[in-house]
Each structure stands twice: as C-alpha cells, then as structure tokens.
Amino acid sequence: MDKLKLSAYEIIEVRKIADIESMGYILRHKKSGARVCVISNEDDNKVFSIGFRTPPEDETGVPHIIEHTTLCGSDKFPVKDPFIELAKGSLNTFLNAMTYPEKTLYPVASYNERDFKNLMEVYLDAVFHPNITKYKEIFMQEGWHYELESEDAPLTINGVVYNEMKGAYSSPDEVLETAIMEALFPDNTYSKNSGGNPEKIPELTYENYLAFYHKYYHPCNSYIYLYGDMDIEERLTWLDEEYLSHYDANEVEVHSQIQLQKPFDAVVSERRTYPITEDEPEEKHTYLSYNKVVGTVLDRELYQAFSILDYVLVSAPGAPVRQALIDAGIGEDVYGSFEDGMLQPMFSIVAKNADESDQTRFVQIIEETLQKLVKEGLNQDSLLAGINSAEFRFREADYGQFPKGLLYGLQCMESWLFDDTKPFIHLECLDTLQFLREQIKTGYFEDLIQKYLLDNAHGAVVVVAPEKGLNRAKEQALAEKLAAYKAGLSDAEVQALIAQTRHLREYQEEPSKEEDLLKIPMLGREDMKKEAMPFSNKEENMGEIPVVRHEAPANGIDYITLMFECNDIAEEEVPYLGLLRAVLGYVNTRSYSYADLANAINIYTGGITSGVSMYPDLKNHDAMAVKFEIRMKVLESNLEHAMKLAEEILNSSDLHDTKRLAELIAQVKSRLQVNLSSSGHTVAAMRALSYESVYAFYNDATIGIAYNQMIRRLDEQMKENPQAVAEKLQQLIEKVFVRKRMLISFTGEEGSYEKASPIMQKYLEKLPEGTPAQAAIHPVLSKKNEGFTDASQIQYVARSGNFISHGYAYHGTLKILKMILSYEYLWMNIRVKGGAYGCMSSFLRTGDSYFVSYRDPNLAKTNAVYEKIPEYVASFAPDERDMTKYIIGTFGALDTPLNPEAKGSRSMAAYLEHLTYEEIQKERDEILTATPADIRSLSDLIASILSDQCLCVVGNEHAIREESGMFTSIQGLCE
C-alpha cells in the first residue's frame, strides 16, 4: 500500500506487525488533518472505528450524552434511530459506541463487505452531520429533561443517560473508581467523570452540549481505524471523497491534548460514602484502597511490567500483598488492578468489606510487605507465570464474542491518543514480554516496586464507606429541589412544561418518514447464508470413558473439557456445586500449595477453570444433563503438564484447610454482592424463570440469588463449624469426580486428538472408577414473585413463563420476534419513552422465556408494557422491506463468529441436548421464509408466557415497597 497513489493522504509509516501477522500503516489526511491507522491482514471480520479526543470539563456527562445522541439521525440518514435500524437489518459482528474518560469511540464490524461499507457510511454521517442541532428532543430523550404530567403532578427528571448513571452511581465500585480518579488527578480531565454524575447531569444546557460537539467533533481531532481484509485504497479514497475532503484542518483550532498531572509532594487521603439499604450492616462494609500513578502509557516495558506485577503482588492466589492483608483480617476480599488505558496509568490495591478503622494498618501492611519483597526478591515462578499467561492470551487472541480487530483497535487507541506516531507499540508485545522474561533474575521488577510504589509520592489512599439512608436522603433532597423549582414557576411556565412533556412523548411516538427509512442501506434475503453452521461431533472411547471430539483449526491449542454428571445431586446440595467451582484450583493439592498451583497453571497452560453447566434434553423436556466441568486450554507440547495438574486438582484438593476455605467463601460472598447488583437483569430473569424451570433453578442455585443466600449462610457457619462445610465438599468430590460419571469434550486440530489421547488416558486412569450417576433428582419448584431490594436508584424488572407447558412448540420465527421486540416494541416503550438504559427478551427451545429491563426508573409501568406485548404482536404488519430487515438482523445474531473453543462448545451442547443439524437448518429456513402472518401467529404463545404471571424485580428498596402488592415476598438482595 505504501506504493499506492493516495494523494489525499500523507503516509507517515508502513511497518510489518509480525506479532499479529499484519501490515500496519499510519497516515494523515492532508486537508482535514484526520489521523488514520490501518491494520491490513487476511481476517475477513472487518472493523472500522472513528474516535475523538473528548476531555470533559465538568461532570454533566456531555461526552456520554453526545455518544448516545449522534446516533439518533443525520443528514443522509434522518431517521430517528439509525443505530437501531442497523441493529435490526445488518449482519454486523459489532455495533456500538463507547465513552471513555478522555475519548469517545464509534466502532463497527462485519464479515459482509457490502454490510461493512453500509455501516461505515451511517456511522461517519452520524458523527459529522448529526441531527442534534435540529432537534432538541434528541438531547432531552437521551440526556435529561423535566417531566410534568399535569398541574398537580410532581415534577421529575428523566433521560436514558441520566438513568444509566443513576444505576452506575449506585455501585460502590463506581463510587470508588470515581473517587480514586478525583484524588490522583485533581488538575486534569481525569478528575471529571465523562459518563456524568446524575446530580450534575441536569446542569447541562442544550447550548453547552452543542458547543462541546462543535468543539471536538472535527476530523482534525479524529482517529480513524481500519482493520482486516479489504481494499484499503478504495476505502480511504471513498473516505476522502465523501467526508474528509469537505473539511479543512485550519478552519478550527482544537485544544484537546490531555495534560499530565503534576506529581504530588505527598500521598493524599480521601473519603467518600456509598449507599446501602436500611437492612445492611455498616460494619465491615468499607472499601480501603491504595493507589499510585505509574509513568505513562507510552512506556511499553512499564505498561507490560505492571500488568505482570499486578498478578504477582495481588491478583494471583496467595499473592504476597493480598495474603498479608487477608492474614491480618483486613477485608474479606483483596484485589488489584492496573488501569493502563489512560495517559498516566494507575496501580491499585483494594480491600473490600473492611473496617474503616483499619486504614492506617492497611497502608502499613502493604508497604511493609513491598519492602520485604524488594529486599528478599519476588517469587520467580510467579513472575514467569504472569509473563507466560500474558503471552498465551495474546497469541490465542480469544476475545469471546468480540472481533479481535476491535480489541486491537482499542489497544491502539491507548497509545495513539497521546502520540500520533505510536498506535502499534502495545500490539508489538512479544519482544517486550521476552525482555521482561530476561529480567526475572536481575532485580528489575523489585526496582520498579521501589521506584513506582514505595518511593512514589503521587498516590492516594481512598476510603469509601457505607452510609444508610444516603439514597433516600438524595431522593428527598431532589424531590424537595424539584418541588421548590416548580413552586417558583409561573402558571405559564408550568403549562409550558406540561406541553413540553406531551410534545416529547408525541415526538417519540411519531414514526420516521417512510422515505427516510428507505435511505438506510440494507442487504437482501439473497445475501443471507442459506446453510446453518454444521456441528462437529465424533464419538470415541478412551478406555471406558466416552469422548466427543470436535475438529477445528486451533493454532496448535487443545481445548479439553472433563465433564462429570451431577443430575442426581440432592436439591439442597446443588449450591455446593457452585462453591466447589469457586474452590477447585485455589486450595492446596498433594504436590502444590495453592499459590504454587496457580503459578504452575499459568506457566504451562492457558488456564484450568471449573464450572457448572446445564444441558436441557430437547427430546424429553423432563430430562436434563447437569455437568461439573473442568476446562483447560493448552499448547499441544504442554499437555502432559496440564493433565498432571488437572489430576492433582481432581484427586488431591485439600478442602480441610478451613482457614483457606473461609477466605475463599468470604471472597465469593464479597464478589457476589457486586455481581448481583451490576447484573440485576440476568439475576432477575433467571430467578423469575426458576419458579417453573429446572434449568433456571440450577442456574440460580449455582450463580444467582439462591447461591448468594447459601454463601452468606456458609460464611457464618465457617465461624462455628467449618469442618462440616469442608466435609460436605469432600463428599461431593468423592461422589462426582469418578470415571463412571465422566465424558470428555475435545477440540483441536486434525490429528491432535490421536496425539493427546494416550497422555490424557494416563492421568485420567488415576481417578477412582466410582459409580455412575443415579436417577435424576427433580427439584420442587414454586412460584414466588419476589422483590429483591438493594441500594440502587433504579430497577431490573423481569417477567417469565414457559410456552411449551401451554402446548406450543418452538419455531424459528421466535428468533425474529426477539429482534422485533428488543429493537421495536420494548425499545420504544421501555427505553425511548420509559428512560431505561436497556431491555431484552429471550425464547429458548425449552419454552423458557423472559422479558427484562435494565437500569429502569420504572416498575409497574414496565410490567404494564409487558402485558401489552400480545396485542402488539397480533397487530404486527410491516411492509416487505421491514420484514426483510428483521430477518437480516436475526441472521446477524445467528451467525456470530466463533473461535475454536466456542465452536467445540456449540457442537458439544447440541450433542448433549440432542439437537440435530436438521432441526437448526429447519429453524433457519423458517426464519428466511418468514412472513408477517407468521409473527402475528405468535401472539397467543406470548400470551401464554405472560399468563404464568412470574415476576421478579431487583432494585430500589423504596420503589419495590411502594408496589408491594405485586409481590408475594420482599427481601434484601444480600440478606
């Protein structure tokens, strides 16, 4: 490409990025000043992103609100929500936008070339020509606005970002992170929360919001990224002709550079509070944090080295700083983090569920432990484990559902934002990791601890303590402020607010014009892949153990899952499966301490983890396989080490070290508190389903509310009778981890199983033979309709039911209906008009179905929206173009790209669920040929789901208690 005639661009650098088998290009658009970075390779999952440096000057959330609103229509595509139109009718593999502390990014990805070009055009027009200057209603809907229904009604505030951030600020982790940033960076932009403080968001005026947009959204302040297999010259020429050539770098002067925070003369201390419910204790609920600023993100060795030190010092099981704090009784959970996606990265050590009075001792223990480590030296195996683990993750490039080109782009931005010449420095990391490997015995890492932690005064000790009634006090203060504001309005101003409320609702309800909708580019049904992705299941036997293997290109990595049948575990013991998952690999074994075990796993493998999975039998709805799984990923050359470690864990885990067991239970309890509140939508949906669904019962009992309730009981029991808990786990191990219960799933290259089989058999023969699983135990289910209260300011509202129990059958068109509801009916009524941040629905082949909202200011109103879904479905009458759009969007969700491990897991799930290729092909055909009448015919099926009347809500304690008539029980989420 360096030889191509791209006259509109200055080619600054061309280089081979060998670590990711790509060519990298750094360019600058001559006329507009836009920065361009290209990573060219053979990956057909193409990625485009445009970003802007957007340093906030206050906490009104203006960068965040602009991120939401630029995607609400533009000059070329004047529909109200092009983002949703694309989500409904695109084959995208990623479609979103993100606000960071100092930048805003708009990335898209797709395998389909025409689709990719469509996505690029809509996004570029959105950021450069948005409708936000024409319609204030966009700002009001997504940002904030006053609502007044009538003269007698209370004045309230609503808005999507406003409610999203009310949810975020309900989390103590968010309060802590914000407080740390304010403490460490008082003089630069990092002290201002770019997402917005809900108390400050209503201070943002429409005029200041537009001024911020015009100040920063110019090509000369932009960062444009292209990745993958495409005609780069064609794309850059199009970009120049259609957009960049219309701008001149000299027409504006953008000052967006991020200033370095001057180092401190002394470490500072800060204290904040976070809300808890009236029922939660204040004792042992404080967060203590120790934080230091570490160089700059442009130092590539330091960037990698501190990620390794995070593992060695704090994050690894038995890490010395973590263990010293736990042994001293400071915090139930201790964790570390190295935030490297900012100009001046920060290293943090946090003790959660601690006593505020331990603040001085907390700092003293950290620094004494660090001094001892500098003097005596770090554990060299821990350093090697941290480095090898980082290298395995980088080489594997497994980012789950996210395209790796997207993650590479985000990593480019971490350095590119601060140096136009350095987008690739953190993608060229193998040499850096080798350099660090060579420093293990030199004192290099110990010197870093001395310089950047012990001798560094640019730090902060931040305490975040619980405060009862804080939310209620804020709610009352806001209500009083709004009432006073309303009281000060004239009659004409009151009527104007009522009219504004009505007008906004009318604006939201008015559909986009047909001619505008036609401007959104889309594919046709003929562009859809007709054949479903095949399954790859080949049955083998390894002695007496059945094996199902899945061949896939896997870059020399074996993905192995040892599956043990657990469907005969007594109902009351099921939560212990969840605890066993949390314990295995984190306790001593025959040959290893738990700290040494963690190091060995990370030195020789890409990870050995455990989990509990449920596989409903689709041929017999009363049956289900419940599997305890040991999952490992390992290079073929290291399989012997991996199997030896797996056998150690299964055969000789020491559960009678009750001190260690108590630490792990306390850690699980601590982390569940955050997970349950932050993932309230999945928690509420699964709990509602658990009233009727055995699958959901196991899910709730092993990761959800029932599991949390048991963990809290066991945390207390460990103080009185710890051996009883250890014995229960030991009995479970002896019953479950036997050959007679085992099934193996193996994913790897062609021929890799033949090489792996004798090694696997050698170690698995050391397991006891045991006895097969007995008849499945069916838990007793009952409808409860519960409200679970926490200190959040919003709700997660879930309704569920099962259509198969009412005589209906699963049909492929239910996948289309999910798309329609999520991006039409629920989106319009719960998000756009209701102000919730999100809404979802799901229809499983088992008949299990749910509707749920995310960070929702409403409760009863949302439930009423659910009740009207059958009416909406019965009247569904799109034209052919819209129907095709929903089908394309459904195919986009259906054909999500899968990495080798995920391909194996998909095939194995089909094997265990007795799902055939013919069935998924039939569903695919049903989707491709669907008509509006097919969707309308689902109305009664939806009504049957709702007729089960299963409701679960997680959220604000006062909102739930005000609607107490909707529930059979109300209790604290973490009681």
Image (tube, rainbow, N blue to C red):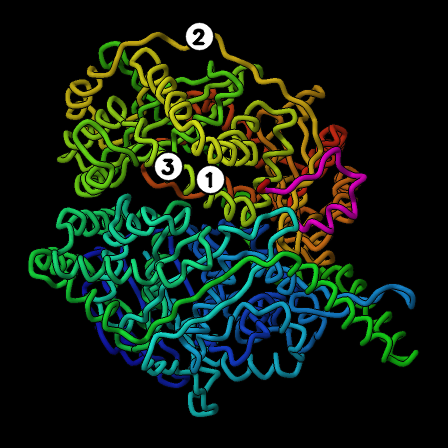
Looking at the picture, does residue 459 appear above or below residue 541? Answer: below
- Cα gap from disc 2 to disc 1, whole angstroms: 43 Å
Left or right, residue 330 beside residue 839 = left
Where are the magenta residues, as a range?
Answer: 955-973
Mark 3 secondary-structure assignment = helix
> Which mark lies nearer to you, 2 or 1?
2
**Residue 305 shows up from this direction:** yes
Question: What amino acid is at disc 3?
Answer: Ala
Front: mark 3 or 1: 3
Residue 529 is labelled as 1
Q: Which residue is mark 3?
A: 902
Q: Which residue is identified by label 2?
A: 774
Q: Nearer the viewer, residue 41 or 904?
A: 904
The reply to whether the C-beta atoms of the residues labelled 3 and 1 are less than 8 Å apart is no
Q: Nearer the viewer, residue 702 or 269?
A: 269
Q: Name the amino acid type tagged 1.
A: Lys
Residue 712 spot, x, y in % from top left: 51, 36
Asked whether, in this view, residue 356 is left or right of residue 417, the answer is right
Instruction: Estimate the x, y position of residue 136 in percent, counting from the top left.
Output: 70, 75
Q: Magenta span has 958?
A: yes
Residue 186 shown in magenta? no
Q: Residue at x 40, y 43 (%)?
A: 897
